[in-house]
Amino acid sequence: VVPHGFVPTESNAPGNVDANVPLVPSSGGAPFAITEHNQGGFQHTQYPYVTGTSILALKYKYGVMIACDMLGSYGSTKRYKSVERMQTVGKNAVLAASGECSDFKYILTLMDGLTTDDYCLDDGQVLTPQEICSYLTRVIYNRRNKFDPLWNSIIVGGVGEDGDSYLGTVGMIGTSYTDSHIATGFGAHLARPLFRERQYDDMPEDEAKALLDDALRVCYYRDKQSINKFQVANITKDGATISEPYALSTAWHYNAFVNPAAHAVGTW
Amino acid sequence: MDKIEAPHTGTTIIAVTYDGGIVIGCDTRVSIGNFISNRASDKITPLCENVFLARSGSAPDTQIVSDIVRHMVHQHSIEMETNPEVKTVANLCMQITYNNKGANHGHGLSAAMLCAGWDKYLGGQVFALPIGGSMISVPWGIDGSGSTYIWGFLDAEFKENMTREEAESFCITAISLAMARDGSSGGMVRLVTVNEQGAFRKLTTCQELDTFHEDMDVRGLQNGLSGMVV
């Protein structure tokens, strides 16, 4: 691992260091040897700090819907409660991500770059959702190969020029695929079974919204790192909209919840 | 997570004295890792008619403490022919946690509890039983992972000699504030009030709690089912 523009030679090696070991300049001091221990002074493996949880998405009759909550967790602290984890890209696509918030922000700047380039070229071409997903797959996979991942699970949803719905995902190690319904994080375990039962590509809009809400509700019941504050993106051939934040009604009125330890004192 | 985790309550518990008795409160979330395995648990356990234990930390550790103490207190109250004193019950809990510091490969029992109740000699009392096996008499106590978010609230807003209604509302607010920020606490708020007349349970769901910064107001929303039961 050698940084750009630095050529290690025998002349810049301190006397008692093996000449075959590549050297890096440390900040303001003498060159030092890159070892497994110091990784050459560069931080590669990351840990996520502010994270978003599940993203849910499905195709319906007129396009694609994507939903998620608005929480940025800091470990187990529910720290930021108005985080927008979805963003429209171009006219007909929405990008949403779970995982590290700062990496998602960085990905959005890459998207800005792409759309700005297209605007300057001014040739009438618009980025399709499939192109966005392919581009991101390459970016994510290459970062993974350098052991410097973007710590996100990304969903790209939209409607192409020909009117076909597109729904794709990219994982943090570069795995990528498309499907009629996708979910990241806890949603993959809690929501997708509901989608398998009830989603079909022709489903009407209100049915799709009800299914998404039910899935969001399950995720809120069972995922520690979630709040009851959601946004839904709706992409059709006419464009993409992201809703205002809303909350779901939740059920707590069961008799069994009132005195669960009644017949087994000391239980939870 | 490298090993299987024992279920953790990852909790918020509170107990306060008021003019005439005590109020104990808790949230209802039990989690294994990030999964909420029980969203309606009851973390306030009766040890006898007039003394209750609010539990946080490792679920099995606190359960075994409450089971053993309940058994000992039952025998004790037969012999004394009356309800036990609160400090006796709290002391029994403390003896178990203190004398088992070698358990769990020297880590001791992961039990952080609040023992509170009412007796005819000293009225309402709260005893904090933090990890390590101390027993400390306090006018109010909090524990569990969510407690870190409400120390400021308690320090600023607790008043001696509140009325019963004030104390109950105070506990509900404290637990709600903790649930608003702690991912390991959530669900509903359970209260137990103990005074000379006896012990009284109360359950408060999210539809009745205050809304805090950046949360959405759910008080108007009906109990939601949409054809699906979880």
Image (cartoon, grey):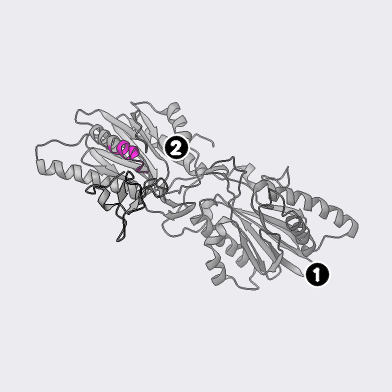
Magenta residues? Answer: A139-151
The numbered dot on residue B112 is: none
Kind of residue sitting beneath label 1: Tyr
Q: Residue furthest bottom?
A: B160
Kind of residue sitting beneath label 2: Gly
Label 2 residue SS: helix
Nearer the observer, B61 or A64: B61
Q: Which residue is mark 1?
A: B121
* Labels 2 and 1 within one chain: no
* Chain that bears disc 1: B
The numbered dot on residue A187 is: 2
Which percent across, then down, holds residue B203?
61, 53
Which percent across, then down, holds residue A93?
25, 38
Residue B229, by quadrant, is top right
- Asked if labels 1 and 2 touch by Cβ distance under 8 angstroms, the answer is no
Q: Residue furthest front?
A: A15
In the picture provided, is A215 more to the left or to the right than B103? left
Nearer the observer, B222 or A26: A26
* Magenta stretch: includes residue A66: no
Above or below, comparing residue A158 to residue B150 in the picture = above
